[in-house]
Amino acid sequence: MSDYVKWQLSNGQNLQSRNEPSQFNPATSPLGASVIDPLPPTQRKGLIAVSTVASVSLVAICSVLFFLTYRFIFWRRYYRRYIGYNQYIVLVYNLAIADLIQGLGFIVSLRWIATNSIHASDASCFMQGIWLQAGNPMSGVFVFAISVFTFLHIVLDFQLGHRKFVGVVVGLWIFGVLMVVIPIGAVGRYVWFPSVAWCWITTQHPALRLWTHYFWIFAAQFLTLLLHAIMFIYLHRRITDCVTLRGSNTDSLCRLKRVNSYMVLYPAVYITLTLPLAAGRMASTAGHTPSATYFCVAGSMMALSGLEEARSQEIHPTTLGGREKV
């Protein structure tokens, strides 16, 4: 650690330790402050909520990963062909891994609750920054990838070859690694600092915040919403055709209606849970930082997205023979 960094950390600690809990507001603290000590009462309560929701989501995500891993290993008991060739299942598996990384980032908040402080020099701060930097956008990227797969399957009746598909998945993870490596390479070890509610990139680095994080989250949200809107219109027309040609009591019509309702529900829930945190961070970059309470509520919603995504995959319309021989 350089002498400058040591001085910066010690100076930040001295600055923050002189603030009483009732006086200290992390939302208006000096940019790059290296220590929040002690935690304000509202922030501590908020982190307890974030950690609780993240713990529940992690249990759900681990259950999905355990189930899918078991099926990947013992696929012959349930399927006629290797389940790894089912592109949708593979994308869900990768989404679960991204949600796991994101959940681990939020669960680090237990450390701040236990010590009643956040220190940039703590190894947990470094790990939280990495996990949140990787997990948040990669979760959105794989949600978008599933939407693309669904669009190709339902609208265009098209599927990528297996090798190309594997290349796409590997490429997405390389992209995720770059989103973590670039900030560290540009700033160094202490790119992750206490940032209102937990450790992440401070507002001192708006370009890194935008191009290695926000942009991809907002792009994934917008494109996912756009694809689902197109699929909704397409399926609505098919439902109309089914009613005209076959009547209103066919199995295919019921399935189309169920799929079409999913096209509305899934993106609405996903964006509702993930948009507040990203919007709050963008507001911080613009100089209008919300309170720590806002970020804790938004973080809880983001952590809850892992649980919702784990549940929603049970009813996804492109699941092909999930529990029977195929």
Image (tube, grey):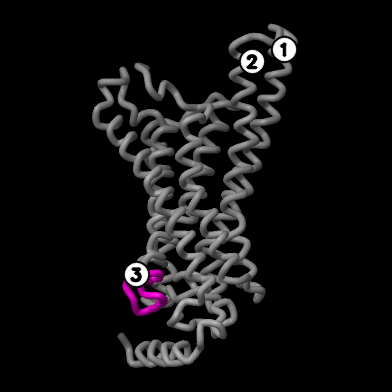
Residue sitting at x 48%, y 56%: 136
**Amino acid type of disc 3?**
Ser
The answer to whether marks 1 and 3 mark residues whose Cβ atoms lie closer than 8 Å is no
Pick whichever of labels 1 and 2 is earlier in the sequence: 1
Q: Residues within 10 Å of mark 2 (few under 14, many from 20)?
A: some
Task: Give the spatial CA distance, label 1 vs label 2.
Answer: 8 Å
**Amino acid type of disc 1?**
Val
- Work out whether residue 175 can be spotted: no
- Work out whether residue 11 can be spotted: yes
Mark 3 sits on what residue?
124
Image position of 298 (left or right of 49): right
**Residue 243: mark:** 1
Image quadrant holding the C terminus, namely: top left
Magenta-colored span: 112-125
Mark 2 sits on what residue?
253
| Viewer-side label of 1, 3 | 3
The answer to whether marks 1 and 2 mark residues whose Cβ atoms lie closer than 8 Å is yes
Vertical arrangement, residue 166 with respect to residue 137, above or below = above
Q: Residues within 10 Å of mark 3 (few under 14, many from 20)?
A: some
Which quadrant of the structure image shows residue 264?
top right
Residue sitting at x 60%, y 71%: 291
Image position of 22 (left or right of 188): right
Vertical arrangement, residue 37 with respect to residue 84, above or below = below
| Mark 2 secondary-structure assignment | helix
Pick whichever of labels 1 and 3 is earlier in the sequence: 3
Image position of 114 (left or right of 47): left
Residue closer to the observer: 326 or 127: 127
